[in-house]
Image: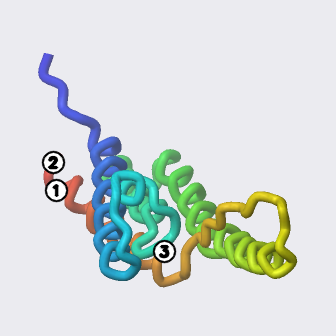
């Protein structure tokens, strides 16, 4: 049986991998961190991997299933929720985490300091989204 990998899965894997690699390279120059954990799981930063991954598969769904498909409608709703969450909810909770950490340090709290994940700026989400669309288009062209 001659089976080909799903373009949907390819878009997800390539979107996440490319965005994480770009984010790690930028992080290396900005913050001088590098390591497998940083490369694979760094949170926040440029570009947004959530956005790139989701928009890559969203683009494949658009071109493979069509604008009128239920799957495209579902993907669009999920995209709106994830993109909004990355900029508004996660970013806000990150800013609150920074303030809480500063207060804990000022008061010399004995409670273990929490890890703070900043979420994304609108620019990071926008760049991640465009990267994902380009990856999705590339996957569609390659898997025709």
Question: Where 14 falls versus 43 (above or below)?
Answer: above
Q: Residues within 10 Å of mark 1 (few under 14, many from 20)?
A: few
Name the secondary structure under disc 1: helix
Towards the viewer: 30 or 6:
30
State the residue position of label 2.
144
For the residue labelled by badge 2, is the local secondary structure a helix, a strand or a loop? loop
Coordinates of residue 102 in the picture (x, y in percent)? 76, 79
For the N terminus, the image quarter is top left
- Whether residue 11 sits left or right of residue 117 in the image: it is left
Q: Residues within 10 Å of mark 3 (few under 14, many from 20)?
A: many
Q: Which residue is mark 3?
A: 125
Tell me if label 2 and label 1 are in contact, CB under 8 Å: yes
N-term-proximal mark, 3 vs 2: 3
At x 33% / y 76%, what residue is drawn? 26
Distance from Cα at disc 3 to Cα at disc 2: 28 Å
Depth order, front residue of 62/23? 23
Q: Residue at x 83, y 73 (%)?
A: 108
Determine crowd level at label 2: few under 14, some 14-19, many 20+ residues with C-alpha closer than 10 A.
few
For the residues labelled 3 and 1, the Cα–Cα distance comes to: 24 Å
User: Which residue appears at 72% of the width and 61% of the height?
Assistant: 114
Q: Earlier in the sequence, mark 3 or mark 1?
A: 3
Cα–Cα gap, marks 2 and 1: 6 Å
């Amino acid at each position: 049986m001659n089976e080909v990998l799903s373009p949907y899965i390819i878009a997800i894997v390539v979107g996440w991998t490319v965005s994480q690699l770009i984010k790690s390279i930028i992080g290396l120059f900005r913050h001088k961190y590098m390591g497998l954990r940083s490369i694979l799981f760094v949170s926040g930063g440029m570009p947004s991997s959530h956005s790139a991954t989701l928009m890559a598969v969203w683009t494949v769904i658009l071109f493979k299933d069509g604008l009128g498909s239920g799957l495209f409608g579902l993907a669009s709703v999920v995209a709106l929720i994830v993109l909004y969450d990355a900029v508004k909810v996660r970013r806000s909770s990150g800013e609150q985490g920074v303030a809480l950490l500063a207060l804990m340090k000022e008061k010399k709290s004995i409670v273990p300091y929490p890890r703070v994940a900043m979420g994304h700026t609108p620019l990071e989400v926008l760049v991640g989204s465009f990267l994902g669309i380009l990856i999705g288009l590339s996957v569609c062209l390659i898997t025709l």
